[in-house]
């Protein structure tokens, strides 16, 4: 059904490619490419051992538009799935336009020299993709991604209008390390140390990073401290749900994690400003990434569960209603299936499902789209059959935290 080129060879990519191979009726040819071909070959070997499916591998610099276009031509791919770094989004979108193929990613563009992630750079491509008759899907991970589809499903099936959305991301897993991030350390720490922002009353409200903490009892996990943060889906949700009065994002962190990040920030190790060390210019955060554990190596060590979802309040037939929709994912079950822990799995599987929606022609409207703008039903059905089953429950009233 579909010839797919995947760019990037981290933990998310590994999970996505394994699941693509498990759906070979949809993904009839898969090519995995990265700057380091050896990482692609390692994933391809695991895919072959676990599924029996052979995938092709290649070396490519995602920042080199000409090289990516040439690879697209060689492979004959119809869809590029960008699972590389968010710094590379625009270059890969340029390559797709030049080569004439569809595009999908899991995280919005972020300039390499500025800790700022916004959609406006990618939304600016809307007309170019529309005129080319090509589809670009933004943010087909879990959050953003599934959490946005959850909101659209609630709007379609449970509510007439949405007034409040709280996205709750809980990782109850433990990898036994003194300090480690669950995905790319550079991106993770940039997110955590940025000012918190949420949408309320028609404008953004900014508060200091990690300053608003609430304890919440998560299904399947238990009580955890969650912190108010800014996350990219807030920008698109507040744009595409015009009735929204408040949209917030929460993520859980243990005390040890918070203490480590605070110390690292205080001594300048989370900075993205270059410094000179023994005559050589380095960026502290990139150096820190080098010495921290690779999230892709933590799968075998991680135990516990994640719980990610939305609490949505709105009106139905004139009455206020609140729903909690979520997925619970087990780290050890994920590792047994695809060799990745649940944080990679919960991003990689939705990337595969989003790609399947494009290849099947279900999501094929020309232009650039966020997940909440698309019909949710087929995507939600695949979540249930592809390892991310969801539950929805009506709550007694809106959240008070």
Image (cartoon, helix red, strand yellow):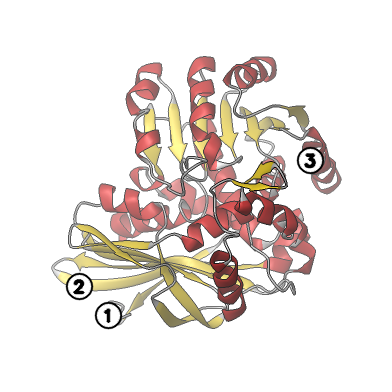
The answer to the question of whether label 2 and label 1 lie on touching residues, with beta carbons closer than 8 A, is: yes
Quarter of image, res 246:
bottom left
Q: Residue at x 69, y 51 (%)?
A: 11
- The residue that disc 1 covers is 397
**How far, Cα to Cα, is label 2 from label 1?**
8 Å
3 or 2: tag closer to the N-terminus? 3
Quarter of image, res 214:
bottom left
Using residue 262 as the reference point, say whether residue 292 is left or right of it.
Answer: right
Q: Residue at x 50, y 64 (%)?
A: 390
Residue 320 is marked as 2
Q: Residue at x 40, y 60 (%)?
A: 230
Q: Nearer the viewer, mark 3 or mark 1?
A: 3
The answer to the question of whether label 3 and label 2 lie on touching residues, with beta carbons closer than 8 A, is: no
Q: Secondary structure at mark 1?
A: loop
- In depth, the one of 273 and 193 nearer the eye is 273
Q: Position of residue 349 (x, y in %)?
A: 60, 50
Q: Secondary structure at mark 3?
A: helix
Is residue 249 positioned above or below 105 on the image? Answer: below
Q: Residue at x 38, y 35 (%)?
A: 121
Q: Position of residue 46 (x, y in %)?
A: 83, 46
- The residue that disc 3 covers is 39
């Amino acid at each position: 059904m579909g010839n797919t080129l995947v760019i990037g060879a981290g933990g998310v990519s590994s999970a996505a490619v394994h699941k693509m191979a498990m759906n070979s009726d949809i993904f009839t040819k898969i090519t995995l490419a990265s700057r380091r071909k050896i990482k692609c070959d390692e994933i391809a070997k695991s895919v072959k051992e676990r599924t029996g499916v052979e995938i092709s591998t290649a070396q490519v610099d995602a920042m080199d538009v000409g090289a990516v276009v040439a690879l697209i031509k060689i492979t004959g791919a119809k869809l590029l799935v960008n699972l590389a770094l968010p710094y590379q989004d625009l270059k890969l979108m340029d390559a797709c336009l030049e080569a004439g193929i569809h595009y999908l990613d899991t995280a919005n563009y972020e300039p390499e020299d500025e800790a700022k992630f916004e959609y406006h750079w990618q939304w600016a491509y809307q007309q170019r993709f529309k005129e080319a008759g090509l589809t670009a899907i933004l943010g087909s991970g879990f959050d953003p991604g599934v959490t946005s589809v959850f909101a659209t499903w609630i709007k379609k099936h449970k509510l007439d209008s949405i007034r409040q959305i709280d996205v709750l991301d809980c990782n109850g897993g433990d990898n036994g390390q003194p300090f480690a991030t669950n995905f790319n350390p550079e991106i993770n720490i940039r997110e955590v140390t940025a000012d918190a922002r949420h949408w309320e009353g028609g404008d953004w409200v900014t508060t200091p990073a990690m300053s608003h903490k609430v304890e919440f009892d998560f299904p399947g996990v238990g009580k955890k401290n969650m912190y108010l943060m800014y996350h990219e889906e807030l920008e698109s949700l507040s744009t595409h749900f015009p009735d929204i009065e408040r949209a917030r994002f929460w993520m859980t962190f243990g005390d040890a994690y918070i203490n480590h990040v605070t110390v690292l920030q205080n001594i300048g190790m989370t900075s993205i400003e270059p410094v000179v060390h023994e005559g050589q210019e380095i960026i502290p955060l990139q150096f820190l990434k080098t010495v921290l554990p690779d999230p892709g190596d933590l799968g075998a060590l991680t135990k516990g569960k994640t719980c990610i979802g939305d609490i949505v309040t709105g009106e139905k037939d004139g009455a206020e209603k609140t729903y909690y929709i979520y997925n619970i994912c087990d780290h050890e079950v994920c590792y047994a299936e695809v060799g990745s822990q649940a944080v990679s799995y919960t991003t990689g599987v939705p990337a595969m499902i989003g790609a399947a929606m494009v290849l099947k022609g279900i999501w094929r409207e020309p232009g650039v789209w966020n997940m909440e703008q698309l019909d949710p039903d087929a995507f939600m059905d695949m979540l249930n059959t592809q390892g991310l089953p969801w539950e929805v429950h009506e709550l007694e009233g809106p959240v008070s935290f």
